[in-house]
Image (cartoon, helix red, strand yellow):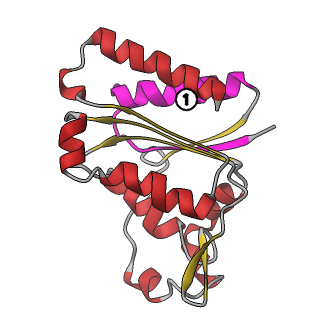
Amino acid sequence: MTRALVLFAHPCAESFSAALHDVVVDRLTARGWDVDDCDLNAEGFSPVLTEGERRGYHDVGPNIAPVASYVERLRAAQALVLVFPVWNFGYPAILKGFFDRVFLPGVSFRLEGGKVMPNLTHIRKLAAVTTYGGTRLRAIMAGDPPRHVVKRAVWHVTRPDKLRYLALYDMNRADAAKRAAFLSRVSREMEAL
C-alpha cells in the first residue's frame, strides 16, 4: 500500500481548488492508498518562519522541533501530491511557508561538501494539481515559478519515479465544461499515479 501525503492549500471550501482536492483524495483512497490529507488552512499551519527557526535552521535535529509532526508525516509518505492555486505567479503563502519551515536540512536535503543532496528519496511519486488565473503564455512570461519549483527543486530532493504537473490555465475564463474536463483529467491522472 502506498501512503500519500496530500498537501492542500486553499482557505475556501467552495473553491474549485477544493473540488480538485476532493477528487485527488477520493481517487487515491479508491485505489486503496493510505491518504494523509493535510489541509494546511484547516489545520491552522503557521507559514511564518520565526527568527528562532531561521537562526537554528542548520542545526539538524533541533531544527525539526517546531514542525515535528509535519516532518513525521512527510517522512512516512511514498507519494506527495500538492493541490493549490497559483496566486500572483506563486504559491499561496501557507504552502510556501510549508516548504520554508518543513523542507529543512536533514529533512528534505542534506549538505555534503556544500552541495544539496536529496533526502526524501522514499517519495516515489510526486504530483501537483493547480490552477492559474492567467494563460499559459502569461505564466511563461512570468517565469512560471510554481512549475519550476515542483519540477526542479522538489523533484531534486525527492527524485521520484513519476512526476506529474497538472495545471488548468486561464481559470478566470474557464467555463463549466473546461472545469469539468480538468476534474476528469485529474481523476484519470490520480488513477494512473
Q: In this view, does 31 lie above or below 5?
A: above
Residue 110 falls in which quadrant of the image? Answer: bottom right
Q: At 47% from the left edge and 69% from the top edge, which residue is drawn?
A: 101
Quadrant position of the C terminus in the picture: top right
Q: Say if 77 sits above or below 60 in the image.
A: above
Residue named by callout 1: 24
The residue closer to the viewer here, 190 or 92, is: 190
Residue drawn where x is 46% and y is 52% of the image? 150
Q: Can residue 171 be seen in this view?
A: yes
Badge 1 element: helix
Is 19 within the magenta? yes
Q: Residue at x 66, y 55 (%)?
A: 73
Q: Residue at x 21, y 33 (%)?
A: 135
Q: Is residue 124 magenta?
A: no
Q: In which quarter of the image is the N terminus?
A: top right
Say whether residue 13 is visible.
no
Between 172 and 124, which is closer to the camera in this rendering? Answer: 124
Percent position of residue 66, x then y: 55, 73
- Left or right placement of residue 89 versus residue 96 in this view: left
Residue segment shown in magenta: 3-31
The amino acid type of the residue labelled 1 equals: Val
Q: Where is 152 relative to 5, above or below?
A: below
Q: Give the residue at the far right of this rendering.
A: 1
- Between 164 and 122, which is closer to the camera in this rendering? 164
